[in-house]
Amino acid sequence: MGHIITVANQKGGVGKTTTAVNLAASLATLKKRVLMVDLDPQGNASMGCGVDKHQLERSSCDVLLGDVQLHEAVMKTPEAGFDVLPANADLTAAEVGLMSATLREKRLSLALATTKDEYDFIIIDCPPSLNMLTLNALVAADAVLIPIQTEYYALEGLSALMGTVKQVQTHLNSGLEIEGILRTMHDPRNNLAVDVSSQLITHFKDKVFNTIIPRNVRVAEAPSHGKPVLLYDRTSRGATAYLALASEVVRRNRKRAS
């Protein structure tokens, strides 16, 4: 049965979409069956793995509104090695439509239930806000992975997100866990970054991934080529870091299941 991980942080610019795409690609490299779900109206995760968001016939919007079944909207990305439920600006309309819909916060969960057994991992990318789309992702998930840039203001955003996770656990998804906190865009030469990193470990202990994603130009360049960094430059520090993250996720999942 597939392990569903929602990648979420309401603060933009922390590497959320980059992490979703590159974690999916790295898990696929480890021979895992992977589905990436794009729930961000910007559609950047779709574009980042080679899907043209402007040419979509079906998208996550159609699935959430109940117009199509999930398997009808999923696309294959042979080069990247995983499946994608793509998104584009139509999702903005879906969010409005969901406000008055029945079971509005469970639409994604119900859709994924029909295909969960076909994948080892399902990775969900969220918009950088706590809205109905993000709520759907948290309700559908087994666990939430939180990318956080090692800077002061990121800590404030993290506490707000933790509060939201606790609310979801209490009222909508009692099984939701913290997959882990991922330090991104880290520069070890920056004293503040090192200080924030140590604060995260002090407060969240083993919830913080051992893997740290460094600032890396190859990671930043890859989306403009419609590729995960593993396909753009497999030898880069960024690609190596995301492979290490995928291995850590697999180990944690194996330990959880044992």
Image (cartoon, helix red, strand yellow):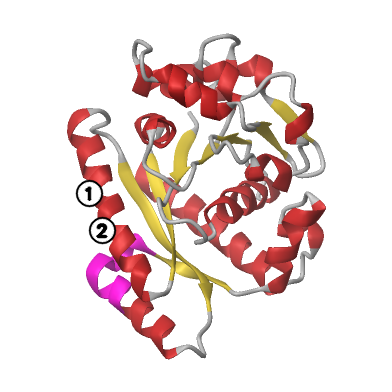
Amino acid type of the residue that numbered disc 2 sits on in the rendered structure: Ser
Predominant SS of the magenta segment: helix
Q: Position of residue 12 (x, y in %)?
A: 48, 56
Q: Position of residue 199 (x, y in %)?
A: 29, 77
- Answer above or below: position of 71 versus 217: above
Q: Which residues are magenta?
A: 199-208
- Answer above or below: position of 97 versus 76: above
Q: Residues within 10 Å of mark 1 (few under 14, many from 20)?
A: few
Q: Position of residue 171 (x, y in %)?
A: 19, 29
**Residue 258 seen by the camera:** no
Q: Quadrant of the C terminus?
A: top left
Amino acid type of the residue that numbered disc 1 sits on in the rendered structure: Gly
Q: Residues within 10 Å of mark 2 (few under 14, many from 20)?
A: few
Q: Which residue is mark 2?
A: 159
- Answer above or below: position of 109 versus 147: above
Report helix, strand or loop for mark 1: helix
Q: Which residue is mark 1?
A: 163
Q: Position of residue 149 (x, y in %)?
A: 45, 68
* Mark 1 vs 2: CB contact within 8 A: yes
